Amino acid sequence: MLLPLVPLLVGVLAWAPALPKPSPRALQLAALGKKLGTRQPRLENPCVTPADGTCERTALAPFFESLNALATGTASAPTVIAAFGNSLIAGDRIVDILREELSATFGDAGRGVLLADRLAPYGPRVRSGLAQGGWEPRTLGEMKLAELPFGISGVYHQAASKARSRFALEGEAQATLWWFDAPGSGPLYVHVDGQPHTTTFPLGTGEAHSLRFRLPEGARSLELVAEGGGAVVQGLVLQHSRPGIVLDTLGVPSADANLFLRAHEDIFRTQLAERAPRLLLFLLGGNEAKRLEWRRSELDEVEAGLRTLVRRSRAAVPDAACLVVGPIDAVRGGTGAQRLVQRPFLDEVITLERKIALDEGCAFFDMFSAMGGSGAISRFAQAGLVHDDLVHPRGKGLDLLGQLLTDALLRAWVDAGTAPEHTTESLP
């Protein structure tokens, strides 16, 4: 059954996490999962520090320690999750369930990394402001190489004349504007409740900057204003000072691990270190399998890309835990007789991602197996939970995937808190 979790005080001195009564949404998704043939989700949380036949420390220990601090009221700052992924999460789906379930249990500390505008003229604005004027989006998932560098969001928006973007505030106390000082770019003005608050001072140096500022108590709106053209926004961070969960959705359509390596290495490292996540979450693999089938990539390229991305990320935040999530079920698609045949190389990508995760001291979650294995995407499609492309789940299908991930992660937290000596075997 898919269950969210809350901590439980055991006696006066002993404490352990425990499963609570499931929420109405969790019960609904559990029933849906049963109909679709999903399996009880379990992730591999390998031991990275074995000692005398037991385990002193698992791959997810840094993140679980932060959850423990939040649960016991001893945390003094937010716990950040950095979630890198492709189009499955680019619209803030799947990870939205993880964010909501964790925030309900451990507290909400804000929205984290946001964008100046959407990546296309359509779609939700959950990750962006309400834009006016012209913001031209560029992403590292595009075939054409961008003229300017990317940071961890994998996206930048460059302003045309009189571009604006308005964000409704939800009591956040802290903000950071990531901007790039492109040659010939104009300044960015930050208005709070319609009043000037701070500004950038571009010099055309070709460098990335972080403009940090506090927000007045009770402020209701923040607006980015580019009066002239050329100003470049790589992201806006909105966060509370209080302890709780922040999940940064760093999803880019068409992205794979190698495309994330297009991000400027120094900017990537600096911005990720600023965010100081306690969990690095990688939800990749679908586009890798597709490009292998199309002979646009080779397995050694896929391995090198993900391994490098994991290492680059961990080098920026060496104290963070790491979790690699394998791709979902995938089929050939199209209109032919083989449209529902499993996509070639999917099994190889899953096996490779698991190997890389365990090699690099990360946990691994096999989403393909959790959603029911081969044929799962067909069952989702028959239930109306996949778009016509037979690639992208929709609606409750995305929610179910998010709940599977959430349940697996928090079950591992419970296991680590109640019986750490029985965690998964040590790394080879």
Image (spheres, helix red, strand yellow):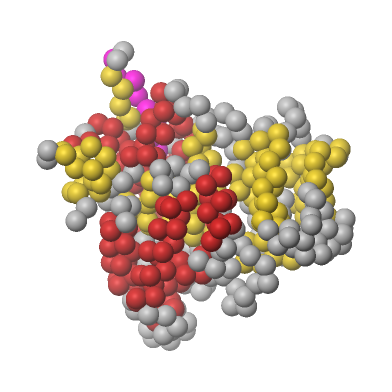
Q: Is residue 155 magenta?
A: no
Of residues 195 and 268, the one nearer the viewer is: 268
Residue 297 in which image quadrant:
bottom left
Pinpoint residue 128: horizontal percent, then vertical percent.
Answer: 68, 52
Q: Position of residue 174 (x, y in %)?
A: 66, 36
Q: Is residue 20 left or right of residue 144?
A: left
Q: Is residue 294 something one can see in this rendering?
A: yes
Query: Residue 292: percent from the left, percent from the top?
Result: 39, 79
Residue at x 30%, y 52% (from the top left corner)? 361
Total number of numbered discs in the rendering: 0
**Residue at left 34%, top 44%?**
60
Front residue of this view, candidates 12 and 76? 76
Whether 334 is drawn above or below 149: the answer is below
What quarter of the picture does the N terminus occupy? Answer: top left
Q: What residue appears at the point 52 percent right and 34 percent down from the top-left corner?
A: 78
Coordinates of residue 395 in the picture (x, y in percent): 52, 56
Which residues are the magenta region?
1-11
* Quadrant in the picture for residue 413: top left
